[in-house]
Amino acid sequence: MHVRTRWPWISLLLGAVVALNPIGLDFLHSAFLAGEQLARNIAQPIVLTALAVMALVVMLEWLMRSFLVKRRARGAS
């Protein structure tokens, strides 16, 4: 595996695709902009949990890429 950058672009791209498709946008609207309190109360914890999971995935990808870049810089294959 040839890692050239530490930027976690794979998980960020996956998160953007999930959030910016029509279903994801509708869910985000329900979580924060819905006129009904019940819809907001149901959707907000789900959206915030998904956001926390995506942040964890981004952090893990960044750590893995950093490890691989450092390992490659040392000369290990």
Image: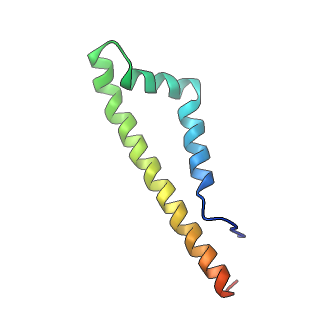
Check the image and report above or below for 50 versus 76: above
Position of 73 with respect to 57 (left or right) is: right
Q: Residue 71 appears at what percent x and percent y?
A: 62, 81
Query: At which x and y percent is residue 73?
Result: 66, 82
Instruction: Write the residue at 56% across / 71% down.
Output: 66
Instruction: Give the image location of residue 19, x and y in percent.
Output: 53, 34
Count the numbered circles shown: 0
Q: As displayed, is residue 19 above or below residue 73?
A: above
In the rendered image, which quarter is residue 72 located in?
bottom right
- Residue at image point 60% right, 64% down: 6
Farthest-out residue, top = 35
Q: Is residue 62 above or below residue 55?
A: below
Q: Residue 48: give x, y in percent of width and height.
A: 36, 38
Query: Is 22 on the left-hand or right-hand side of 3?
Result: left
Q: Where 62 falls versus 37 (above or below)?
A: below
Q: Residue at point 39% right, 47% down?
A: 52
The front one of 5 and 28 is 5
Residue at 40% x, 21% y is 30
Q: Quadrant of the N terminus?
A: bottom right
Front-most of 50 and 35? 35
Q: Which quadrant would the C terminus be assigned to in this image?
A: bottom right
Residue at the bottom extreme, as displayed: 75
